[in-house]
Image (cartoon, helix red, strand yellow):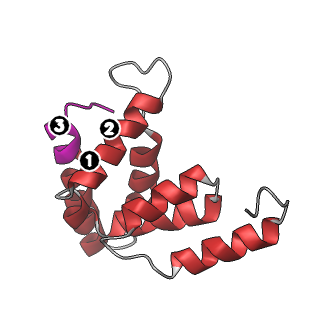
């Protein structure tokens, strides 16, 4: 409705309110809503949250399905082309590295994401 009535402030307010609901069970659905309504800030908050809980997310079928859908949405996708959702999650995983212990945690998270990609037959 905010788009229909040209109320960008309402759209931002809705995005901020939805961001308060982020948890492991809602993050994929909220990310889909953010993409659908072009809520860039909420989309970024979702991918940042996904990066934090990636080891749990990779066990959820709805997350794997979201990755598959993103891969399919890339027009003319070649075998090793990037997938925007995966790229955003990788960015957030790697952006917090400041200490050696952070490096180990980053490697663990990236490995979990890579394992998911292999299990669903994607290479990016």
Q: Which residue is mark 1?
A: 64
Report the side of 82 relative to 20 (left or right). Answer: left
Examine the image and state in which quarter residue 55 appears. bottom left
Report the side of 46 relative to 115 (left or right). Answer: right
Q: Nearer the viewer, residue 44 or 18?
A: 18
Q: Provide residue 65's location: percent of width, then percent of height.
A: 29, 45
Label 3 crowding class (10 Å Cα cut-off): few <14, some 14-19, many 20+?
A: few
Q: Provide residue 17's location: percent of width, then percent of height.
A: 59, 80
Examine the image and state in which quarter residue 77 appears. top left
Q: Of label 2 and label 3, which has the lower sequence position? A: 2
Tag 2's secondary structure? helix
Q: Residue at x 39, y 52 (%)?
A: 90
Q: Provide residue 116's location: percent of width, then percent of height.
A: 19, 46
Instruction: State the quadrant of the N terminus.
Output: bottom right
Q: Which residue is mark 2?
A: 68
Q: Provide residue 48's location: percent of width, then percent of height.
A: 45, 65
Residue 53 visible (yes or no):
yes
Instruction: State the quadrant of the C terminus.
Output: top left
Q: Which residue is mark 3?
A: 118
Report the number of discs.
Answer: 3
Q: Are marks 1 and 3 in contact (CB under 8 Å)?
A: no
Tag 3's secondary structure? helix
Q: Nearer the viewer, residue 6 or 25?
A: 6
Q: Of label 1 and label 3, which has the lower sequence position? A: 1
Q: Nearer the viewer, mark 2 or mark 3?
A: 2
- What's the distance in space between the residues labelled 2 and 3, CA to CA? 12 Å
């Amino acid at each position: 409705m905010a788009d229909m009535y040209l109320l960008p402030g309402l759209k931002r307010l809705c995005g901020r309110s939805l961001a308060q609901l982020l948890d492991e069970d809602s993050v994929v659905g909220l990310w889909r809503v953010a993409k659908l309504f072009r809520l860039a800030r909420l989309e970024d908050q979702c991918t940042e949250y996904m990066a934090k809980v990636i080891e749990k997310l990779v066990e959820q079928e709805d997350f794997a399905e979201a990755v598959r859908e993103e891969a399919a949405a890339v027009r003319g996708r070649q075998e090793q082309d990037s997938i925007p959702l995966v790229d955003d999650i990788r960015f957030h995983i790697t952006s917090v590295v400041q200490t050696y212990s952070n490096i180990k945690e980053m490697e663990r998270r990236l490995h979990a994401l890579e394992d998911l990609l292999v299990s669903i037959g994607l290479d990016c």
